Image (tube, grey):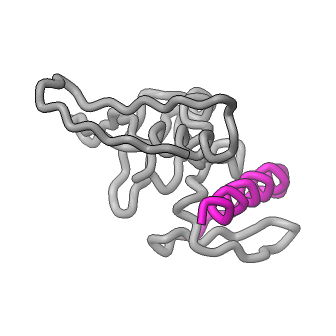
């Protein structure tokens, strides 16, 4: 793969172009990487903040409102859980319950729990329970990410 860098001070905005013959796993990984730089807005109290999806540990719907949990902060998003997952499906988010989704890149450990459920220990120490209904899709997504990481190293 050939990579070129060009500095152009007259540009109004930085941009990246990726040219490819066919979409391989490497190209898909590059696409996922740049998709993670998209920002979204989150509300906390009466203020609006710019958030990056990769900073979100997990998402949870409470009283029909979607909340994004970062390492120490919580923000309300103007998305439904399904719409968020559709927009950021390639950023490592996967559903772990009817009203919860997790960022796979923020999962530190996966432990067995009662009734075939899994306990997810996040990078910040929080523990989430993976509902067994979503176990297969979670493990498939986790396996896919591990394959791509190993392939690129």
The quarter of the picture where residue 51 lies is: top left
- Left or right position of 140 against 92: right
Q: Is residue 78 above or below residue 7?
A: above
Q: Is residue 2 above or below residue 142?
A: above
Report the magenta stretch's main SS. helix
Give the camera-side residue of 41 and 151.
Answer: 151
Quadrant of image for the C terminus: bottom right
The answer to whether one can see residue 47 in this image is no
Q: Residue at x 24, y 34 (%)?
A: 48
- Left or right position of 66 against 21: left
Q: Is residue 138 magenta?
A: yes
- Left or right position of 12 against 37: left
Point out residue 75 in the picture as x, y percentages from the top left corner: 36, 44
Q: Is residue 11 above or below residue 125?
A: above
Give the camera-side residue of 55 and 58.
Answer: 55
Point out residue 121 in the picture as x, y percentages from the top left corner: 59, 72
Q: Is residue 121 magenta?
A: no
The quarter of the picture where residue 10 lies is: top left
Q: Residue at x 75, y 68 (%)?
A: 118
Q: Which residues are magenta?
A: 127-153
Point out residue 106 in the picture as x, y percentages from the top left corner: 52, 62
Total marks placed: 0
Q: Residue at x 49, y 71 (%)?
A: 123
Give the camera-side residue of 111 and 87.
Answer: 87
The answer to whether one can see residue 135 in this image is yes
Query: Residue lying furthest left in this view?
Result: 10
Q: Residue at x 49, y 45 (%)?
A: 33
């Amino acid at each position: 793969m050939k990579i070129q860098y060009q500095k152009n001070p007259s540009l109004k905005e930085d941009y990246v172009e990726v040219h490819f013959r066919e979409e391989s796993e490497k190209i898909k990984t590059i696409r996922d990487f740049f998709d993670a730089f998209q920002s979204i807005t989150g509300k906390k109290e009466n203020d609006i903040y710019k958030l990056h999806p990769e900073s979100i540990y997990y998402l949870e719907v409470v009283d029909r409102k979607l909340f994004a949990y970062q390492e120490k902060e919580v923000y309300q998003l103007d998305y439904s859980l399904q719409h968020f997952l559709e927009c950021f499906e390639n950023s490592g988010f996967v559903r772990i319950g009817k009203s919860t989704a997790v960022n796979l890149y923020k999962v530190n450990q996966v432990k067995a729990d009662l009734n075939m459920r899994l306990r997810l220990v996040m990078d910040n120490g929080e523990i989430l329970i993976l509902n067994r209904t979503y176990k297969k899709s979670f493990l498939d997504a986790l396996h896919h990410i591990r394959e791509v990481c190993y392939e690129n190293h």
